[in-house]
Image: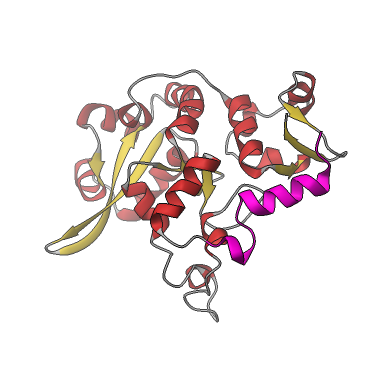
Amino acid sequence: MASLDELRERRAFECRLTPDRALGSLDEAEAFLLDRGLLTRTADCALPSLFEACHEEPYAPASPGFGQWPRTKFPWFGELGARGYLVLGVHRGKNLLVTGEVAALLDPVCRAELERLGDDPLLRHLAEAGPSELEDLQLELGLKPKELKSLRYPLERCGAVVSRSIVYEEPHRHTSVLSRWDQVVPESSEGGFEDLVVAGVRAAIVAPEEELRQWFSWRWYWDDDLVERLVAEGRLVRPEPGWVATA
């Protein structure tokens, strides 16, 4: 087993945490995503972050929030989504870019959420109408923008609904298309929450054990024995107490 220091050194390289490993192009960013499997937008945990790997000065240094995004590379997150990678709200409501392989691990969980929330009016409407733009949903459901947002947020957070951003040029406007998970991923796959946790640790290289429960939205899938079970099964290892890595 590698030592914690060795794993941290590997993490710095693989997750591009040093300026000499800065992403230089959108193609490099895509390769980074394919290598790690999942990327957060901004750095907020041990999971690899696209913006952290850019190592670019912020757009507006004196401003919080969006102003701290990379000055020229901030569109890359959305542009990777436009290349066909799913952008999901399952990182506790924050956006997460995932590859097809990680989407397959997510599939059983998201389908279970569709079943659990089957009576939701937005889910029922999308099942009948198909993927729909926000403006159409507001009109068809008789909702104001804030009312639609309050309906969609918990569904996106648990993976039952997927949002895809689109831009129209004439006239220029930005909007989103909402889809049910089973409309975006029509073929079911094997996987599940434990597989997703292992994929997250693999992406991070090494992570604080106590942090794992905070990565994803589905608190009801977490139990205090989960990490111990994955270690006993040989899927995770502890290089030192309180830290985990993949075997």
Residue drawn at point x = 51 percent, y = 26 percent: 105
Image: 75 above or below 61: above
Q: Nearer the viewer, residue 182 or 86?
A: 86
Q: Is residue 139 left or right of residue 15?
A: left
| Image spot of residue 153 (x, y percent) | 44, 45
* Left or right of residue 241, residue 201 in this image: left
Which residue lies most toward the right here?
Answer: 241
- Which quarter of the image is occupied by the C terminus? top right
Q: Magenta segment: does it hold 6?
A: yes
Q: Quadrant of residue 128?
A: top left
Q: Is residue 75 visible?
A: yes
Horizontal and vertical percent for residue 74? 43, 64
Q: Which residues are magenta?
A: 1-22
- Relative to the observer, which residue lies in front, 50 or 45? 50
| Placement of 143 over or under 216, stated as above or below | below
Give how far across and how far down residue 45 sits, in percent.
66, 51
In the image, residue 223 lies at what x, y percent?
72, 27
Confirm whether the magenta stretch covers residue 100.
no
Using the image, determine if residue 51 lies above or below residue 180.
below
